[in-house]
Image: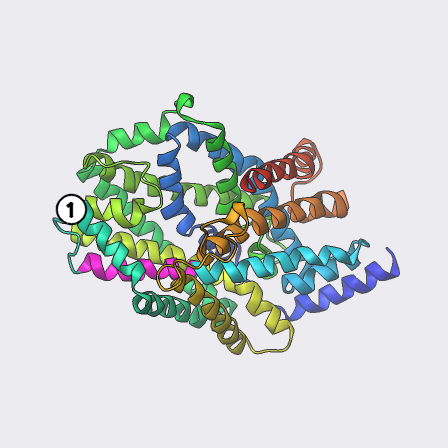
Amino acid sequence: MSSIESASSAVVSREAAVHPQWSSRLAFILAATGSAVGLGNIWKFPYITGENGGGAFVLVYLLCILVVGLPILAAEILLGRRSGCSPIKGMTLLARRDAVSLRWGWMAWVGFVAAFVLLSFYSVVGGWSLAYIGLAAQGFFSGADAATIGGLFGQLLEDPGALLLWHSVFMLLVVLITGSGVRAGMERSIKLLMPLLFVLLLVLVGYAAVRGNFAQALSFLFSPDFSKLSTEGVLTALGHAFFTLSTGICVMMAYGSYLPPQVNIARTVVTIGLLDTLVALLAGLAIFPLVFANGLEPGAGPGLIFVTLPLAFGQMTGGVLFGTLFFILLLVAAVTSAISMIEPVVEWLEDKGVSRMLGALMSGAMIWLLGVCTVLSFNVWADFHPLDFMARFEGKTLFDLFDFLVSNLALPIGGLAIALYAGWAMKPQTLRDGIGLGDGAVFTLFHFVLRFLSPAAVLVVFVYNLG
């Protein structure tokens, strides 16, 4: 071992000695699954499945999770655990330790900025779920027609005061949880919220089985018809498989920095992938039976949750109660993801000597302020399209541009960098021992996928998203 590597190892060891850790493997699994299980599973997965024909899309999505999502997720968690500190500081330490260029540190900055921007508009969308809990509980959907429910959503978006209020409440909740500490704040809340999420989801699936067209939903989700799947649908499945596991934006690197050394990453990642996929499929089984029972369109797009589904609840017995429960579920999923998005920023400030609560307050305030741009982009600034001079961005609001920056640029770039660093810059033995796969064919296959298949798939998504 070189003197540089020995010195860097000693630094990493000292960092790990004072760095907080998850209390157990289960705590980390719940935290990582909570990060992965967000609006992407409850909101986005059902509507993109509906848009792309159902079963065939689901099958391709599961394959993409296996080939793209899980290998990069395992690599990102390993990088975090090896560093034992914030992603920005950690990547510099690891580059020294692995005797590679310090320029690899840029990948942490890409993820850092992406998480910051993502949470700024994610908080606004999370605020919608808060607003809809109140609407559902007060019976606003009962007996309402499509125009009325669509009008409710439109009124919410057009009211900057209401959007700002719910955005503020959501961010305050995230700040208070994160600022309370890794174990006292994040872990304690996740141990409460994740079981609640699963209970709510199972209750809603039961309701859908009784009140909805469950047989048609099962057929739609699990009977592949590849004639309904286009090339665009395959690329959408590939992109969502990458997006849903929270990879590429340093979130899992930050969470991995709290992972105890004795936890086997390979087995843990498989569990996270299974739970994340289970939630996405259960969300489909909770939503599509109600959609089909009411003769509604499964491919309704982003409005499926906030327009189409409230219309279904409004026509069904028990719709007030179960509609309220559904939006509580949506809020829980949003919060568990949001606390992971702010974590890279808070952890970086902690490395700078800022106390955790102050770091959470500072991070939350800056993210909240940027989120105001998203709030205004739906109403006051709806006609403000700053990049109209570029054909690719013509007509896009600030919200559209933020979403494009994160989803189409930062996520794939960050994921590609993680795959390349773990697959090429790290020594194979370091990767093998860290992941916990041991010698043999399984690690050889994993290493091949991480080196070649995962980067190629991410590049395809990146080029496709750029149009």
Can the viewer see residue 371 in this picture?
Answer: yes
For mark 1, what is the residue?
145
Which contiguous range is marked in magenta?
Answer: 122-137
Which residue: 25% across, 44% down?
308
Q: Does the magenta stretch include residue 151?
A: no
For the image, the number of numbered tags is: 1
The percent position of residue 182, horizontal first and vertical second, equals 51, 67
**Label 1 sits on what residue type?**
Asp
The percent position of residue 290, horizontal first and vertical second, equals 23, 39
Quadrant containing the N terminus is bottom right
The answer to whether residue 268 of the structure is visible from this angle is no
371 left or right of 110 in image: left
Q: Quarter holding the C terminus?
A: top right
Q: Quadrant of residue 112?
A: bottom right
Applied colour scheme: rainbow
Asked whether 125 falls inside the magenta stretch, the response is yes
Instruction: Name the residue rendered at 31%, 51% in the picture.
Output: 199
